[in-house]
Image (cartoon, grey):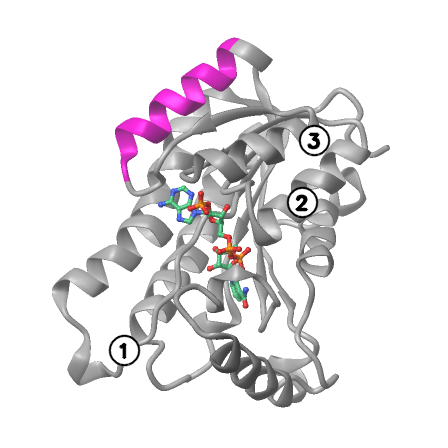
């Protein structure tokens, strides 16, 4: 029960890693608020975890700001902010359009930065911010240029935010998942394509399989908890050994 009575906000808490984290935070006594875009999954997640759900598109800074204000009204200050919402997409360098680049960066980097900026006055001193990066930020994967650049931006941004927040004792860390079995790579794909991608992705992980949302969420909870009280500014790879052993 590491989070008894702690106010935890998960931006992107209605699917995949964010939903797994919501379940784990709820099981450990947190008072939870979740955001996401999909009304149906957001409502279901909120019901299951006893959480407040606020619909907000992370690509829209005004919506994020309004959601945070609503959360503050309902829960008071924030002890843990988990900035997890993200979108994927592949295009080789010659095929990257301005729209494609902007779609990814508006949510994954711009949206995340302004969410943190607007959450600062609501965060309690001594709290924690955890941000979901990706091993894509340091791995040279063809077709991943727009996503990798956004996640690398998050990584750079997180270290500066961590430094600026030192006087307030708010720790800021990243988790960087490797291939993890969530909806992110399944949207708009046939069952056959999904099976092919799962095989391909499993084959690049040294331990021989994709990670689960629960495994990645556990790392996020660790960094958010007092167990990680001496860990600040790190990027924790949760990737079955992809980066260090691949
Ligand atoms: N799965 C992997 O292999 C992998 C690897 C490295 C990093 N990651 C990162 O892990 C994080 C979670 O992804 P996941 O794998 O759990 O994928 P997922 O199952 O697709 O979940 C993505 C989450 O982000 C939310 N989200 C996406 N765009 C949003 C927006 N514009 N506004 C608000 N919420 C938004 C989604 O809510 P809605 O459904 O309501 O939009 C959902 O809660 C992402 O940052 C992703 O980049 C994943």
Quadrant of the image containing the N terminus: top right
Magenta stretch contains residue 64:
yes
Residue lying at the far front in this picture: please name it: 191
Give the foreground label among 1 and 3: 3
- The reply to whether dot 2 and dot 1 touch (C-beta < 8 Å) is no
Residue located 50% across and 65% down the image? 134
**Above/below status of 71 relative to 237:** above
Q: Which comes sooner in the sequence, label 2 or label 3? A: 2
3D distance between C-alphas at marks 2 and 3: 10 Å
Q: In the image, which disc is placed on residue 21? A: 2
3D distance between C-alphas at marks 1 and 3: 36 Å
Q: In the image, which disc is placed on residue 103? A: none
* Mark 2 surroundings within 10 Å by alpha-carbon count, few (fewer than 14), some (14 through 19), many (20 or more): many
Residue 208 appearing in the image: yes
Q: Which residue is mark 1?
A: 91
Q: Which residue is mark 3?
A: 49
Q: Quadrant of residue 238?
A: bottom right
For ligand 1, tell me if the residue under mark 1 lies within 8 Å. no
Q: Quadrant of residue 13?
A: top right
Residue located 36% across and 40% down the image? 58
Magenta stretch contains residue 63:
yes
Which range is magenta? Answer: 60-73
3D distance between C-alphas at marks 2 and 1: 30 Å
Residue lying at the far left in this picture: please name it: 98
Q: Nearer the viewer, residue 78 or 30?
A: 30
Residue 80 appearing in the image: no
């Amino acid at each position: 029960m590491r989070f008894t009575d702690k106010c935890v906000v998960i931006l992107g808490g209605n699917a995949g890693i964010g939903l797994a984290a919501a379940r784990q935070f709820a099981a450990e006594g947190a008072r939870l608020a979740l955001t996401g875009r999909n009304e149906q999954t957001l409502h279901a997640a909120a019901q299951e975890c006893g959480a407040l759900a606020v619909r907000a598109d992370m690509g829209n800074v005004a919506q994020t700001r309004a959601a945070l204000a609503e959360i503050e009204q309902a829960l008071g200050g924030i002890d843990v902010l988990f900035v997890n919402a993200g979108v994927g997409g592949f295009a080789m360098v010659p095929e990257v359009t301005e729209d494609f680049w902007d779609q990814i960066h508006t949510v994954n980097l711009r949206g995340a930065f302004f969410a943190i900026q607007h959450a600062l006055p609501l965060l309690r001193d001594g709290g924690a911010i955890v941000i979901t990066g990706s091993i894509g930020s340091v791995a040279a994967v063809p077709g991943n240029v727009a996503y990798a650049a956004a996640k690398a931006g998050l990584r750079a941004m997180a270290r500066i935010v961590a430094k600026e927040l030192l006087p307030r004792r708010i720790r800021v860390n990243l988790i960087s998942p490797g291939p993890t079995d969530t909806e992110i790579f399944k949207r708009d794909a046939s069952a056959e394509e999904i099976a092919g991608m799962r095989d391909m992705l499993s084959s690049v992980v040294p331990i021989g399989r994709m990670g689960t949302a629960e495994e990645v969420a556990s790392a996020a909870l660790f960094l958010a908890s007092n167990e990680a009280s001496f860990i600040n500014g790190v990027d924790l790879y949760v990737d079955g050994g992809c980066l260090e052993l691949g």
